[in-house]
Image (cartoon, rainbow, N blue to C red):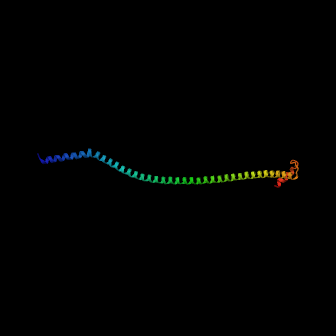
Amino acid sequence: MNINATLFGQAIVFFIFVWFCMKYIWPPLTQTIEKRQELITDGLVAAKRAVKELDLAKANASDQLKEAKHIAAAIIEQANKRKVQILNEAHTSAIAERDNILYQGKAELAAERNHIRDHLRKQVAYLAVIAAEKILKRSIDANAHRDIFEKITTKL
């Protein structure tokens, strides 16, 4: 066996093998590698986009939280204002009720005082008539001298 023919035969078989691999094996393998590279590239782009969206979502959530805190503070302030208003209304109402009760009490007191004065005047007039009767030693008719009683009552 000749080494040159064997080497030449092996070279021809090697070139046929290389041609066969380049024709039938290499294209699907290259295509699969390119698809994988595209998937990896798309995944990296999607990951970068997701990171940006996450940062945007965090910023948006932070803004919404600040806005919610602002709204809550406004609601609390409005509730405090309403509380003060209700307290002022209750205070005003209580003062008006107190004044009304005092006015009614004073009116009742004045009416009672006038009633007691009239009663005392009548008693004093009665006592004056009794005293006059005893002084005069005679009986005075109360019905006949009613005008005298009235004058005495008004003077007292």
Q: Position of residue 154 (x, y in %)?
A: 82, 54
- Number of numbered callouts drawn: 0
Seen in the image, is 104 located left or right of residue 18? Answer: right
Which residue occupies the extreme bottom position in the image? 155
Quadrant of the rendering where the N terminus is positioned: top left
Give the residue at x 14% y 46%: 6
Q: Position of residue 70 (x, y in %)?
A: 52, 54
Give the residue at x 75% y 51%: 112
Q: Nearer the viewer, residue 140 or 68?
A: 140
Q: Position of residue 3 (x, y in %)?
A: 12, 48
Seen in the image, is 25 located left or right of residue 124? Answer: left
Seen in the image, is 9 located left or right of residue 85? Answer: left
Give the residue at x 35% y 48%: 39
Give the residue at x 36% y 49%: 43
Seen in the image, is 43 located left or right of residue 3? Answer: right
Q: Position of residue 96 (x, y in %)?
A: 67, 53
Quadrant of the rendering where the C terminus is positioned: bottom right
Q: Nearer the viewer, residue 41 or 56?
A: 56
